[in-house]
Image (spheres, helix red, strand yellow):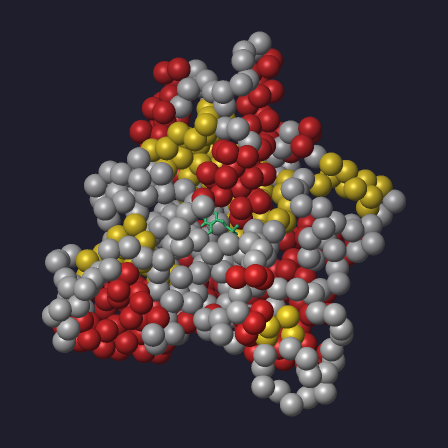
Amino acid sequence: MEKGLIMVFNKHNLKDLDDDDKVINPIYSRHGLKNPIPKYELPDHEMLPRSAYHLVKDELMLDGNSRFNLATFVTTWMEDEAGKLMVDTFDKNMIDKDEYPHTAEIEMRCVNMLARLWNSHESEDAMGCSTIGSSEACMLGGMALKWKWREMMKKQNKPTDKPNLVMGANVQICWKKFCRYWDVEPKYVPCEGDRLIIDPKMAADLCDENTIGVVAIMGSTFDGRYEPVEAIAKELDRIEKEKGLNIPIHVDAASGGFIAPFIQKDLVWDFRVKRVKSINASGHKFGLVYPGVGWVVWRSNDDLPEDLKFYVDYLGGQMPTFAINFSRPGAQICAQYYNFLRLGMDGYAKIQQACQDVAMYLSSEIAKLGPFKLVSDGSDLPVFAWTLKEETNFSLYDFSDKLRERGWLVPAYPMPENRRDLVVQRIVVKNGFSHDMANMLLDDMKRALEFFSSQPEFKKKEKGSQFRH
Ligand SMILES: Cc1ncc(COP(=O)(O)O)c(C=O)c1O
């Protein structure tokens, strides 16, 4: 186990704990809380609902404030009406299509809207589904690529035991999981110098007849930059001419799927690019829904192998499903539909543009603070990263810790393999992070810099906490 990793599922050895550490012991004077409440064992007796509610709620107050969480891509604010709708629909299980046909219908409407948003051609029978998040959506996209490749190889009587997937070293961890879980060799295009995303030519040159596809990211989790989907497709056209290999693209648009169609309409990255066979996005990131909902859409029924579909009852008939989970909450899908109706194209565009305006303002102001150099500026996703441009008596890990004292969560971490020497700090600007809050953060940053310059003997930290992407 990696040092410093917090295991959420490890079992405490009660023998090693002091008596006080085995119990939750709030100082309430309420009937029902007379006995200490064990922390790691199931209590012997019940308690009043209000007591249980307060015990849990009070513990959770010690978490960071999600509005100050500039590390996460995931939605931290929704309108009260959306929250109410989610409470109203918490009881719906997404897989019970026959019992909840309208939830299933709403899921289908959302898939239709997304397929059109991503420029699926009307003559192509796009297919898609909701997932628990982009990780599951990427697994499904990757599985479809693997199954399609295997069908093709079998038809040609070729071996199918060494599939590989080509992607930038900056992929999100879900692609590493995909490769490990489904026995696919990952082939990474390394970062080099200032290029911290995929290189289209290098990606195409890594492809061979065992390549199930190329992943293009819109945009990179590390710094918010978009990968050039059209350029990757062009390089793959070249490889097709040179080697006769027809390599498909999956676009991991976890964040960009809900940004580019609204504020970078001219950027061609979606089903307009012929080689793009599937696209995923997180409804719970810039889709503006609380966690967990994701989406995956295939260009056509043909790109989703029949072998991967399972059928469930639906209105006296059968409906194809494609998912790793069986039971899953329906509330997030209802909330996604709420956002689509509530915001429409204009509403999403206004919110995403506001996020980008704040991101670009903040990045330009951070660049002016002195010791920092921007790695990205928020002009792709409203996400940007910076590094230290000069020798300082503090590291970005220290800077991150200092901001945390004021409640801000701004992670510091090294870039991927080959550029692990480059440590950056990143901010994700989300709906609800206002210009005003950006100025508050800037003031706290200035105060932090003053603190470090007043401490010439400050011993800097070279490693930070384990930040996961
Ligand atoms: C590019 C990319 N792909 C996939 C994921 C995984 O998404 P999720 O958290 O929705 O499972 C992320 C999450 O940050 C991401 O940035």
Q: Nearer the viewer, residue 201 or 28?
A: 28
How many marks the image carries: the answer is 0
Q: Is residue 189 visible?
A: yes
At a point 49% along the width and 20% down the height, the residue shown is 162
Residue 351 placement (x, y as % from top left): 46, 66
- In the image, taking residue 81 as reference, residue 251 lies left or right, namely left
- Relative to the observer, which residue lies in front, 18 or 47? 18
Q: Quadrant of residue 319?
A: top right
The extreme front residue here reads 15
Task: Name the residue at 28% across, 55% down.
Answer: 463
Give percent across and percent down for residue 254.
Answer: 48, 49
Residue 446 visible in rendering: no
Q: Position of residue 416 (x, y in %)?
A: 32, 43
Q: Decide: is 179 above or below 134.
A: above
Name the residue at the right extreme: 316
Residue 157, position in %: x, y? Answer: 58, 9
Front-most of 300 and 76? 76
The single residue placed furthest to the top in the displayed view is 157
Q: Residue at x 53, y 28 (%)?
A: 183
Q: Against 12, is 369 above or below?
A: below
Residue positioned 49% across, 60% down in the render: 74
Q: Is residue 151 left or right of residue 416?
A: right
